[in-house]
Structures are given as structure tokens and as C-alpha cells.
Amino acid sequence: MLYITRHGKTDWNVQEKLQGHVDIPLNQEGIDSAIKAHDKYKSLHFDICYCSPLQRAKRTAEIFLEGTDTPIIIDDRLIEMGFGEYEGVTGYFNNPSCPINDLFVNPAAYVKCGGAESFEELFERTGSFLKEEVYPALDKGKDILIVGHGAMNCSIISQIKGMPLSQFWDNLIGNCELVRLL
């Protein structure tokens, strides 16, 4: 089985700042949510956990898997989508004049700008992760947990479900929400 979860909340989530590659820690609400997820899903077994290198995801994985012997493997391909010079900005979602607005409101029309990552680049790295790590492990009957981020998780879910880019954000999961994919 394949499961995926998103890191717990950070102060930047609360402030609606684009995080991307900026390494923001969990806030207390994020820690508490990870503890609740740990308690809620402690009966599930995972053979392996793959995790983003960013501390908000790593700490979530550590809390979620506390008391288990599940190894946490850091994979750089699971880092959040890069938003370039727009990391740290607010108001991007409701501001059509913000060049990165299309990424969120009309993903099929989004063109990367300001050093941000394109959907093609995101799908390429997460697709190689699925092909090289996830599918072979699933073929061996392994139970896998991925701990990642909003956009990065959406790219994995979209690829697995074969969904068009126009429906990319339909796959967004909440902080510390666990989704079973395969």
C-alpha cells in the first residue's frame, strides 16, 4: 500500500506565505497535529517512509512514526515545488497581477517565472521517484509512507491518478491528513 501525508502547519502556512524550498519549522499547531495523526494511525504498518529533506516534513515524519522501527529515507526529489523569488510572498492567490497566480488558480496556463519551478520539472523529479523507488517497492509488497508538501504531493497524486494539470489542486490534502493511494 502507498500512503501520503503533508507536513504539519508552520507559521508561514498560517500567514499564507509561499514556502517552497524555504526551510520553515513546524509551529506548535503543526506538532500537535502530527501527534494526533500518530495516535490516529498508529495501527498502520509502514515498511519504509520516504520524506522531503525540509525540516517541516522530517519532523512530521519523526512524530508520525515515533515508537516504530520504520526507517525514514530522505529523498531530495520530495522537496516542495520551488517558487523562486516568490517564496515568502503573501497575496499571490487573490492577486491576478501576481505572475505566480496562475500556478494556483489556472495551473494549465501557468508559465514558470522568477526562478520558480515549472510543472514539467516538478513532474519529472517526482515521476522519477515513483518509477525508481515507489513502484518497485510496491511490487515487492512493501507498505510505503511519503511525507511531503502541498504541491509536491499533488504532483505524485496527479500522476498516479492520471489527472490533467487543470485538476492539479483537486489533489491537495490538508496538513497531517493521510491519504491511501495504492
Image: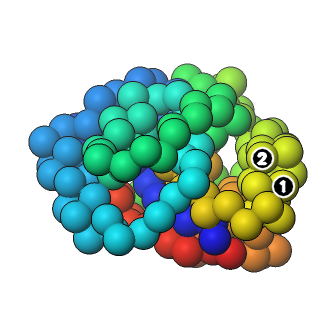
**Disc 2 element:** helix
Q: Are marks 2 and 1 in contact (CB under 8 Å)?
A: yes
Picture coordinates of residue 147, whole percent (x, y): 50, 49
Location of mark 2 (residue): 133
Left or right side of 35 for 160? right
Judge the density around disc 2: few (<14), some (14-19), many (≥20) Cα neighbours within 10 Å: some
Viewer-nearest residue: 152 or 132: 132
Q: Is residue 96 visible?
A: no
Q: Is residue 6 above or below residue 66?
A: below
The CA span between labels 2 and 1 is 6 Å
Location of mark 1 (residue): 136
Judge the density around disc 1: few (<14), some (14-19), many (≥20) Cα neighbours within 10 Å: few
Picture coordinates of residue 169, whole percent (x, y): 58, 67
Residue at image position (42%, 69%) is 44
Left or right side of 41 for 106? right
**Disc 1 element:** helix
Residue at image position (42%, 39%) is 57
Q: Is residue 35 visible?
A: yes
Most extreme residue toward the front, as rendered?
A: 69
Residue at image position (44%, 54%) is 6
Q: Quadrant of the C terminus?
A: bottom right
Q: Amino acid at mark 2?
A: Glu
Q: Amino acid at mark 1?
A: Pro
